[in-house]
Amino acid sequence: MSHVPLMFTTEEKAAIVDLTPEIAENWLTFNTENRKQSDMNRARLGRAMLEGRFQFNGDTIRWTTVATLADGQHRLEEVVATGKTIKTVVVWGIKPEATITIDRNKRRTLRDHLERSGERHGKELPTVLNLAVQWARGDRFNIGHQSGALLPSYEDADVFLRENPAIRASVEFASQLPGARKVFNLAHLALLHWVFSDIGGDDSDEFLARVVSGDHRHEHDPEWRLRERMIGLRQEHTDRPWIVVPLACKAWNYWRDSDSLRTLRIRTGGSNPEKFPEPY
């Protein structure tokens, strides 16, 4: 491991270093010409560092020949904030006019990673993983919101899939169920199947298959009421996960209790809002 003095050079060179909080704090004083910081990116990096999941992947801290920081501010900020030391590549000697080319290439997505790893259903699986991680963290009425504090990192999603391989079967169930796309976004259906399967086993298959097929005995059957709401949301393009998931959980609970359900709705405002209908 190279020792890196707190000085700069116009020479083109690179080194792998242990970036300590002390070095990072010093280097941030030279962060005078960088882009606006992303709170979302910082939150993900900081969480990975605190949980010991930050991995050395060859990403660089870059310096210009005029001693300004060209790349790496988020990693530096989070090393200081968390007090953690990380291993990173540092490159010196970049001409100031060359910084315009930084971050111009298309970034790899979670879908890119999953497909390169041989996963099927690359379109739906990333969304299902994001939702499943949020569910496991306890997000309920906020599930699916694109917030930096809630949205999991690619690393979180990748680890979660390895620890919860049944998600693959749920995605397969959703993709193979005839007529499913008319009623559900397939990623939402797969998430619900995964959640309900963990609780009720094969009941999850039966309930969701009845919702999709329209098979029911009475108009107040929970599976029929859920089907009607889901089709309406799909047609209105308002089938967001933070709306779909609580409605489905409420209908599931009524179905498990063999109760009728005249109106399927969730009161989230007013003086007496409903609690999230935790599935059982």
Image (cartoon, grey):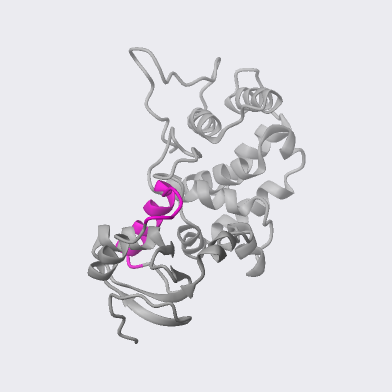
- Give the x, y percent position of residue 92: 44, 76
Q: In this view, does 23 lie to the left or right of 38?
A: left
Taking the magenta stretch, the answer to whether it contains residue 43 is yes
Residue at the spot x=51%, y=39% of the render?
Answer: 144
Q: Residue at x 46, y 71 (%)?
A: 60
Residue drawn at x 57%, y 49% as measured from the top left: 128
Magenta highlight range? 32-52
Relative side of 105 to 248, left or right: right
Image quadrant in which the N terminus is located = bottom left
Could you tell me which quadrant the C terminus lies in?
top left
- What is the residue that sits farthest to the top in this orientation? 271
| Residue 57 is at least partly visible in this image | no
Pick the front one: 157 or 71: 71
Q: Residue at x 39, y 59 (%)?
A: 73
Q: Is residue 178 visible?
A: yes
Q: Position of residue 87 (x, y in %)?
A: 36, 76
Instruction: Name the residue nearer the viewer: 126 or 10.
Output: 10
